[in-house]
Image: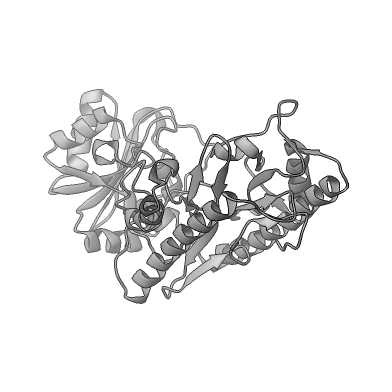
Amino acid sequence: MRIDECQERLRAEGIDGWLLHDFRFSNPLARRVLGLPADRFLSRRWFYFVPAKGEPRKLVHRIETGALDGLPGERTIYLRYGELEDGIRSLLSGCRRVAMEYSPRNAIPYISRVDAGTVEVVRSAGVEVVSSGDLVQWFESRWDDEQWALHLEAAKVTDSAYGKAFGHMARIVGAGGEVRETEVQKVILDHFASHGVVTDHPPIVGVGPHSGDPHYAPVPGADGVIRQGDLVLVDLWGRRDHPRGVYSDLTRMGFLGEVVPEPYRTMFDLVARARDAAIERVRSAFSRNETLKGWQVDDAARGVIEAAGYGSAFCHRTGHSIGRETHGNGANMDNLETREERTVLRRTCFSIEPGVYFPEFGIRSEVNVFVDGAGQVHVTGGELQTEIFPLLGDWRA
């Protein structure tokens, strides 16, 4: 985090300062924003305050006086708990509004990293605590040019993995055989490994009813068997094996037959229209230089599905932030599980993945959207899927 850039953001948002705090890895966001080593264990509470103007200030325990060495600013050392509270009041002297990793009513739990008791202590200093959500994503979720390039490299591999996975199913089933979900998983993971891509979890390969579970995970020995006439959902994600690699996360659908039957075709058309409406909502906002919130993107997709009478079948948010983790720390496209009030920032990436889920089957289409520094909107990971691929007929992935 560059202090001058942080202070510029604070002034732009009308916030007097940002109070970063951690206790025994309770706030990974604060640690990452400040660049503290991920494995550096600190056993005592520390605070780092960045005012909108002036020099930052530190508050550390006497046992760990060097906890924040390497960061600029004057250091105050406390020992007793009363000295800790006095130190917090001193850090915040003259402030009225202070940002912390807090979300009112825990509306956005990804940001709520500071415990209620600490918030009470800070409020007792006479300040209003506001959410640091947009500050966090400004420093945590925006990509530089190197990361954008790494994403595009990963997207090529994730895109090409579908040719391997769907081709494997088509060859075996087309010859009268059958294939297990975990076998297709292995095809994908082998393709990743041979192209320098890693992942935090194996991909989802869901056949039939398993495709109707948004977070289904195949288990060896209890996984589904894919046969002729089956619908299959494949959700895969990976990043380049690079210290700054960021994810590509895609979902596509295939059918083990020559002609995709109803209602699969109708439901996929609905989901694709919802996906495209969300993409257009992002494009139109940035073309007009409009401030866009995550909940507004969710509304664009959800409105299409609700208008068709299937709102209850769309049981998850429209999309999530993407970064060094599959689910990043930027704004999500959500007005269901949370009301995402964070702004969709330039140089951030997120998924758009509406779906409908029934006991018999589920349909999802997932793409990634990156808004560059000029406000141009990029959809990555190959061409948009416009229909379910008939894997035993004429298909393309």
Closest to the observer, 244 or 153: 153
Please give the name of the residue rendered at 86% of the width and 41% of the height, measured from the top-left corner. Answer: 177
For this view, does 74 lie left or right of residue 165? left
- Which quarter of the image is occupied by the N terminus? bottom left
For this view, does 374 lie left or right of residue 186? left
Relative to 131, residue 13 above or below: below
Residue farthest along the right direction in this orientation? 175
Q: Quadrant of residue 268?
A: bottom right
For this view, does 312 lie left or right of residue 359? left
For this view, does 273 lie left or right of residue 171? left
Closest to the observer, 341 or 353: 353
* Percent x, y of residue 377: 46, 70
Task: Indicate the colouring scheme.
Answer: one colour
Q: How many marks?
A: 0
* Percent x, y of residue 178: 82, 39
Relative to 97, residue 120 above or below: above
* Percent x, y of residue 30: 39, 44
- Which quarter of the image is occupied by the C terminus? bottom right
Q: Quadrant of residue 39?
A: top right
State whether residue 53 appears in this view. Answer: no
Please give the name of the residue rendered at 19% of the width and 31% of the height, measured from the top-left corner. Answer: 120
Please give the name of the residue rendered at 40% of the width and 53% of the height, measured from the top-left corner. Answer: 308
Q: Quadrant of residue 90?
A: top left
Please give the name of the residue rendered at 26% of the width and 58% of the height, measured from the top-left corner. Answer: 10
Closest to the observer, 123 or 191: 191
State whether residue 266 appears in this view. Answer: yes
* Percent x, y of residue 149: 60, 67
